[in-house]
Amino acid sequence: MFSLQDMWHQMGPLAKGVAIVLLAMGVFVIGIAIERLITYMKARAESVAYLLRLRERIRDGKLGEAARDAAGFKKSPLAHMIGAGVAEWTLAEKTVGDDEMESIDAVNRALDRVKDREVADLRRGLSFLATVASSSPFVGLFGTVIGIITAFQKMGLEGGGLQAVSAGIAEALITTAFGLLVAIVAVWLFNFFTTRVEAFIVDMNDTSSELIDHMLKLERRSPARAAKGGDAL
């Protein structure tokens, strides 16, 4: 009966290289998973806290202060996006003046720019998970081929029989199993984290739409807008 230690000692250099590559891929996958999980947990917690603060500012009629509040939520992609939108709206109110659509368009552009950047940051590392998920079975299959070659070489040198080929077969099977294990874990993690990113995107889209609606209401209620409408009548 072979132990893992015995298999390792009987593996050839190429098979050992395959095993080391698969082990490194697995370690990187686990490291990315831990880092992403911590990042998403902090982002979710701070986004919820900032959203509550934003609703307080809207209720108190102090929307302009939401940009300063966003600076205190450094891990929240939602805070970064809304803070940039509010800051752009405040600037547009001073530079654009009474042009309502120009102000809202400027806010929309700012929201889109920051959202794209934040989504890209949320997806950081997920492409590596996808690469590992798709490539590790082939790396394991390469180890399988090497193991079979080793088995046939020993059969040619030592003659037939199970004893002569068992080490090579075990070497082939363990690299295949290891490659499949790494791929399965990477696929699960990729799908899980992709779902979390999509949830962030939905929250960001909903919140930005609500912000734009509120800004439109403020624009239409402003004294300058009302006076302009009265002059038109």
Image: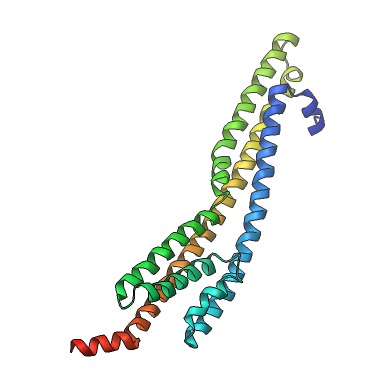
Q: Is residue 174 visible?
A: no
* Residue 145 position (above or below residue 212): above
Name the outermost residue toward the left: 233
Position of the N terminus, as image quadrant, is top right
Q: Nearer the viewer, residue 54 or 181?
A: 54
Left or right: 121 as drawn, with respect to 224: right
**x then y, percent, for residue 155:** 70, 13
Q: Where is residue 21 in the image (x, y as percent from the top left)?
A: 67, 33
Q: Is residue 44 left or right of residue 202?
A: right
Q: Which of 67 and 187 is in front in this view?
A: 67
Q: The C terminus lies in which quarter of the figure? A: bottom left
Q: Nearer the viewer, residue 186 or 163?
A: 186
- In the image, what residue occupies the spot 67% across and 15% down? 152
Depth check, front residue: 112 or 228: 228
Above or below for 63 versus 134: below
Residue at 39 percent across and 72 percent down: it is: 92
Q: Where is residue 160 in the image (x, y as percent from the top left)?
A: 71, 13
